[in-house]
Amino acid sequence: MRLSALPRAVAALLGVSLLWGAALPDSIASAQVTALSPDQRPTLVIVTPADELMLVHHAQPLSPSTAERLALKLGLFIAGPIIRSHARESVDPLPQSWRTAQPDRGFGSELTQALDHTQANWPWRGLRMVSSPAQVAGTLNELKGQDVAVVTLSCELLDLTHSVQFSAETHVRLLRRVATAHESRTDIVIRHLAAPLRAERQHAQSFASTFGAGGPLDRMVNDAALDLSRALAVTIARIATPAPEVQVVGRRLADLPLKPKCAECRPTDTVLHEEPGRIWVAPSRSAGTILSLPVG
C-alpha cells in the first residue's frame, strides 16, 4: 500500500469492528469519528526503537521424550546439535553481508513518516517522538491531565535456523487524565510478522541478495510500518472512544480457507481484518493482543 492510500485505508477501517470481539453499528461508528474533536483525542507519544536490527533466536527446547526419540533415531552425534539448536537463546548483530547503511532497515523512519502523514484523519491530535523512558516521563508531566497514548516500538529478525522472519511489535498504553489522582490505563500489544525468508546465518554470503538495500527484507520492513500504522489508528480509536459491546457475527480462524501459522491461535479466535496475504487476529490465549499474520 502506498503512503498516499493510508487515509482511505484508515477511514475504512475506523468504520468497521476490528477489536476484542466488539462490533460498532454504522451509526455509532459515524458518530464517534465525528466526535473526535482536537481537544478530545489523545496525544501520541512514540518511543523510538533500537538503532540496530538484531538477529534473534528464541529457545524452544524439545521435551525430554522428543529429544530421546530423536537421539535413538539419528544417533547422538547427529541429534545433539539439533537439540542444542532448539534450546539456544541468542541475540546477535546481522552477519556483515546482510547489513546496509540503515542499521534498523529504516523501520523507525518509515513508521514515523506513516504516522505523521498530515492528510490522514488520525485519532490523535499530536505526535511526540522520544528515545528513552526518562523522556517519556518528562513528556507526560507536560501533558498532565490529558489523555496520552504511549507507543513503544521494537523489531527483530527471528532466526528460524533455515529461514528468518521479520517481527515488529508495538506496545500501546493509553493513559487517561495522565499524572493525576484519576489516572487510568489500558494496555494493548500489536505484533506484525512478515512471511519467512529462506536464509541461514551459517551460509550468510549465499543469501546476501535477500538482504541488500531495497531487497525483500527492506520491502517487508516498509510493509510492516504501514500495517502497524493502520493497526495503531484503529486500536487507539477503539480504546479512546469505547462503544457499547456488541457481539461479533463474523469470521473465525476456522472459517478461513488459508490459515496462518500461529502457535497462539485457536480455531475459534476472531478474525479482525482480512486482506490479500494477511489477516489480523485477536488470540484468546493472549488477551489484549492483536496479531497481524501472513497467509499463504
Image (cartoon, grey):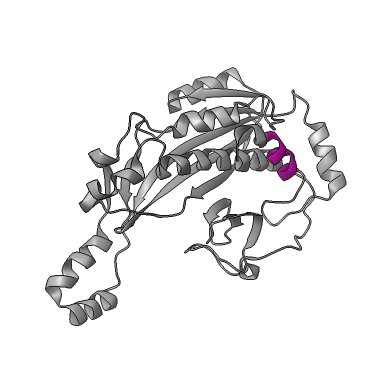
Q: Position of residue 38 (x, y in %)?
A: 74, 23
Q: Position of residue 24 (x, y in %)?
A: 79, 50
- Judging depth in this view, the residue of 28 and 225 nearest the camera is 225
Quadrant where the N terminus is found in the figure: top right
Q: Position of residue 47 (x, y in %)?
A: 48, 30
Q: Position of residue 62 (x, y in %)?
A: 29, 69
- What is the quadrant of residue 255 in the picture? bottom right
Q: Residue at x 76, y 63 (%)?
A: 249
99 relative to 127 in the view: left or right: left
257 relative to 35 in the view: left or right: left
Evaluate whether residue 183 shows in this view.
no
Evaluate whether residue 40 shows in this view.
yes
Residue sticking out furthest to the top:
142
- What is the quadrant of residue 265 in the picture? bottom right
So how many labels did they put on this image?
A: 0
- Judging depth in this view, the residue of 7 and 191 nearest the camera is 7
Per the image, is 12 magenta? yes
139 relative to 9 in the view: left or right: left
Q: Residue at x 57, y 66 (%)?
A: 258
Residue sticking out furthest to the left:
77
Q: Is residue 125 above or below residue 85?
A: above
Q: Is residue 138 above or below residue 93?
A: above
Task: Decide whether the magenta segment is chiefly helix, strand or loop.
Answer: helix
Q: Is residue 247 above or below residue 109?
A: below
Q: Residue at x 43, y 33 (%)?
A: 49
- Please state the extent of the stretch shown in magenta in the rendering: 7-14
Per the image, is 126 magenta? no
- Judging depth in this view, the residue of 281 and 105 nearest the camera is 105
Q: Residue at x 37, y 35 (%)?
A: 213
